[in-house]
Image (tube, rainbow, N blue to C red):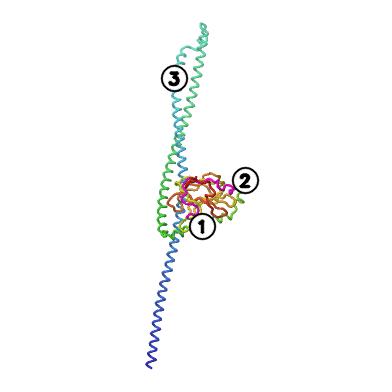
Amino acid sequence: MRRKLLSGLLYLLCVAIVQAEQDKTAEELSRIQSEISQANQTLSENQEQQGKLMAELAEIEKQYGITVVSLKAMEKQIAEKQQKLRKVKDETNSLSSDIREQKTALEVLIKAAYAMGKKDKLKLMLNQQDPALSSRILVYYDYLNKDRLAKLDYILEAQSRLTALQLEQAKDNEILEQNLKVNEAQQKLLVDTQAKRKELLALLEKDYSSTQAKLNQLQEGEQRLHKVVAGLQRFNFKEVIKSVFDLSSDQPFENLKGNLPWPVEGQIVQKFGSRRMDSRWDGVLIEASEGTELKAVSNGRVVFADWLRGYGLLIIIDHNDGYMTLYAFNQSLYKSVGDQVKAGEVIAAVGKSGGRDQPGLYFGVREQGKPVDPLLWCKQPEPGDVG
């Protein structure tokens, strides 16, 4: 009996221990699951935050590019208006000087006419003592009258022109003042945009501080570009717009291999296939100053002109028959989708969009959607330099 009771107690104790251990394990499992859930939520929030930051960066860099283009256009207008005002001022000064000279000459004629006027014209005509002298005096008299009238007409016309020039100058001065105010506002917008971009880049750098995070970002950008190119490759632009643009004069792109010009002058700092973290460059990176104009390497049509994650402001030109050229990290885009461009035509400006801290141009060539070395397609540069 005692043995049975002892066995029962021992069994109950074992059950209690097992139950306690199970409860502890369940509690630990629940805690771990909670931590995993929290970590996933944090990761999701981070990704969402990163997505928001990247979207904001895209808008800021687009706005920056638009502002730069607008600012350049305004500065050009201001320069043209200032040049016009200088010409108007020079013409006004010249005209004023002419009027003064004509007035002085007119005064001389008036005095001469007044002196001759003391002798009545009729008396001169009836003077029979010296008919030759009378004839000469009458001719001179008519000459003075005609010259005086001509000078009066010139002065009146010059005064009218001078008044018009003065009105034009006043109007141009008003427009110039307005342009200068707009220019000042755009300069401020540019500075504010640069400051916002700097803040965003600092936040993104914090989020992507680890090597793995930067690698993931890089790979994601490459995948996005691959999808864009693949999608464009499937779309037959030649068939769609051949009725709009004349394609007959375009030399086949493949015939230009080895003779294409470079889109911009500069040094190649990253060659095709060189290491890019755990990836490879599928184009070349050309070092160039921010704002430098870059040109299309051949005739074609713009099939993409927008901001793309990892590449910033990107423009892609289709050259028919499966060939495309890509120009990325731009400051501003001067062309839109559907625009036809000629070889050597300015299409964008070098920048550091896409979150870069140094200006430069990514230039890529695609053959049937696959990256190929631009050095095989463009003219052989001097050591290190292109363009």
Task: Give the residue at the far top of this rendering.
Answer: 129
Residue 154: x and y, percent? 49, 24
Q: Which residue is mark 3?
A: 107
Residue at 44 percent across and 49 percent down: it is 359
Q: Nearest the camera: 65 or 275?
A: 275
Residue 241 belongs to magenta span: no
Task: Report crowding for label 3: few under 14, some 14 to 19, many 20 or more residues within 10 A (C-alpha).
Answer: few
Closer to the eye: label 3 or 1? 1
**The disc label shown at residue 361, or none:** none
Is residue 377 in view? Answer: yes
Total numbered labels: 3
Please tell me whether mark 2 sits on a helix, a strand or a loop. loop
Please tell me whether mark 1 sits on a helix, a strand or a loop. helix
Residue 270 belongs to magenta span: yes
Task: Give the residue at the far bottom of this rendering.
Answer: 1
Q: Which residue is mark 1?
A: 224
* Distance between mark 3 and mark 1 Cα atoms: 83 Å
* Amino acid found under the numbered disc labelled 1: Arg
**The disc label shown at residue 248, or none:** 2
Which circle's residue, 1 or 2, is located before the other in the chain? 1
Residue 116: x and y, percent? 47, 13
Q: Nearest the camera: 175 or 200?
A: 200
Task: Report crowding for label 1: few under 14, some 14 to 19, many 20 or more residues within 10 A (C-alpha).
Answer: some
* Amino acid found under the numbered disc labelled 2: Ser
Q: Which residues are magenta?
A: 247-274
* Amino acid found under the numbered disc labelled 3: Glu
- Magenta-colored segment: predominant secondary structure: loop
* Distance between mark 1 and mark 2 Cα atoms: 33 Å
